[in-house]
Amino acid sequence: MRQALGIAAALALCLPTVARADDPHHAAATAARPGRLGMVVVALDRAKQVSFAGGKEGVLVQQVTTGSAAARAGVEVGDVIAGVAGTPVAAPRAYQAIVKTRKAGEPVALIVFRGDMPLALLARLDATPIPALSWIPDWKDIARHLRAGSGAK
């Protein structure tokens, strides 16, 4: 009986807890994570700067994740992001630095050029995904660990 309780305790420590979406602790943990827009941006070369945004600085949207905050806001592949949250963006690192400082759920204003046409878009940031577990406990390892702690072989 003691060994069964020990195994249950070890599993409780090793296995992740599955949170429900309506759980207030889950909501608080999600809001505390950094936000993300869900798009890949690259630097504009001088030729693209002139042709896409009339000479304005910005970053070129190379990919937009389906269903992401950027997609819901209306960002499209080929758009040029000139500003995020009121701050001009001239390089991909600047874009990433601005987004990283914002929390999931925050609204973020985007200044976008689609060809020559400037657009003001509003996106509500998604939560940065939690990395998947890379290790799942093996029953034999857990049992071996418990036996070693109790002195049994």
Image (cartoon, rainbow, N blue to C red):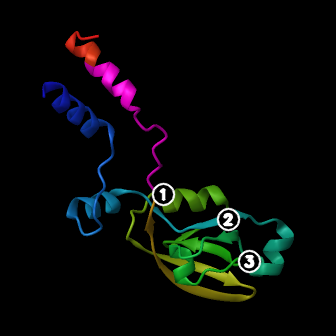
- At which x and y percent is residue 92? 65, 59
The answer to which quarter of the image holds residue 11 is top left
Q: What's the mark number on residue 148?
A: none
In the displayed image of the protein, which residue is found farthest to the left?
A: 1
Determine the CA span between mark 2 and mark 3.
10 Å
Q: Amino acid at mark 3?
A: Gly
Vertical comparison of 119 with 110: above or below = below
Q: Is residue 89 visible?
A: no
Element at label 2 = strand
Dot 3, crowdedness within 10 Å: few (<14), some or many (≥20)?
some
Q: Residue at x 28, y 64 (%)?
A: 20
Drawn side of residue 87 relative to residue 60, left or right: left
Magenta-colored stretch includes residue 134: yes
Vertical comparison of 140 with 77: above or below = above
Drawn side of residue 1 relative to residue 72, left or right: left
Q: What's the mark number on residue 78?
A: 3
Q: Amino acid at mark 2?
A: Val
Q: Are marks 2 and 3 in contact (CB under 8 Å)?
A: no
